[in-house]
Image: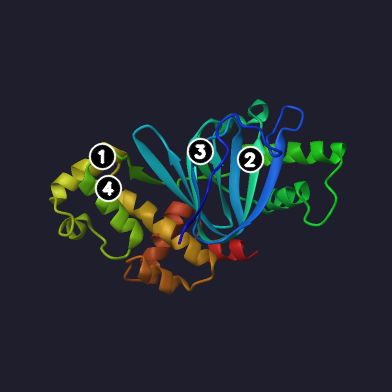
Amino acid sequence: MARTSQAAPLGDIDPFTPTPESPVRVRARDMPADMHFEPHRHAWGQLAYCASGVIQVSVHAAAAATAYIVPPSRAVWIAPGALHAVAVLEAAAFRTLYIDPSVVPAVGAHCRVMAVTPLLRELVSALDPVGGPPPGPARMAALTGLVLDEIGHAESLALGVPLPGPGSDKRLRALCQAVLDAPGRYATLHDWAADSGASERTLARLFRAQFSMGFAQWRRQAVLAHALPRLARGEPVGQVAAASGYASDSAFSAMFKTAMGQPPSGFMGKNAA
């Protein structure tokens, strides 16, 4: 059974609320699989990532949402005021940075997926040392400056999977959910259309109207969201490729390198490091 946690609404004060005087706060939590945080928003910016495990962060807009799958080597930047929900897909050592709006980097006005560099990972650990004393004011100021600089210069990755809003065509919503549940089942929209109750032409039109992209591009994002956590766990590339609907390792690796800028082996090596 899924466990649900309520988050503080916009403007509520808690011990982790950042201020201009203490602009970066770190919250570390170990969360079991199937934990959910209902949609909520904060007045501050938020960087969410996992030291281990996998989470899904869904950012909601007026007409649609975007789902981000976050393995340990990636993080989601959540802009101040953005409505978002969190689901724990695998038991996670969850790390959250709360950042006061007064110091949010210029790139922080929009939500995005970013790479977590080894330096940023160590900076977070230094801000919240496990079992050790908290850093003093001077060290905290130095660490804060470095964290903000790393966030401002972090590589952005186009890894979000856009999802149809509640008022969209129910056939499109059902198809998107089916692909997310089993992205390797079919490779083409023609095959998916046979199970959807709509023609291929109708579905293609719905994808363009809702997401401003074709089905193939959207499915690639869904496949990456499915494949990243499995690669992060160290599953063989061939096994992940087959589960993603690719007939060969080389075809999957080519798609992965185009999207991620590195082959699956490179991603697995960085994650292991």
Task: Please tell me whether mark 3 or mark 2 is closer to you in this view.
Answer: 3
**Of marks 1 and 4, which one's residue comes earlier in the chain?**
1
Q: Is residue 244 above or below residue 24?
A: below
**Of marks 4 and 2, which one's residue comes earlier in the chain?**
2
Q: CA separation, marks 1 and 3?
A: 22 Å
Pointers 3 and 4 in contact (C-beta within 8 Å): no
Amino acid type indicated by mark 3: His
Amino acid type indicated by mark 1: Ser
Q: Is residue 75 left or right of residue 19?
A: left
Give the position of the N terminus as an image quadrant. bottom left
Q: Is residue 253 left or right of residue 133?
A: left
Task: Please tell me whether mark 3 or mark 4 is closer to you in this view.
Answer: 3
Task: Please tell me whether mark 4 or mark 2 is closer to you in this view.
Answer: 4
Instruction: Say few, some or many: other residues with alpha carbon within 10 Å of mark 1 (under 14 / 14 to 19 / 20 or more).
Output: some
Any mark on residue 173, and which? 4
Instruction: Say few, some or many: other residues with alpha carbon within 10 Å of mark 2 (under 14 / 14 to 19 / 20 or more).
Output: many
Instruction: Say few, some or many: other residues with alpha carbon within 10 Å of mark 3 (under 14 / 14 to 19 / 20 or more).
Output: some
Any mark on residue 61, and which? none
- Pinpoint residue 150: horizontal percent, then vertical percent: 67, 42
- Pinpoint residue 65: horizontal percent, then vertical percent: 39, 41
Quarter assignment of residue 148: top right
In the image shown, does 173 or 76 lie closer to the viewer? 173
Any mark on residue 151, and which? 2
Pointers 1 and 3 in contact (C-beta within 8 Å): no
Q: Check disc 3 and report the residue beneath it.
A: 40
Amino acid type indicated by mark 2: Ile
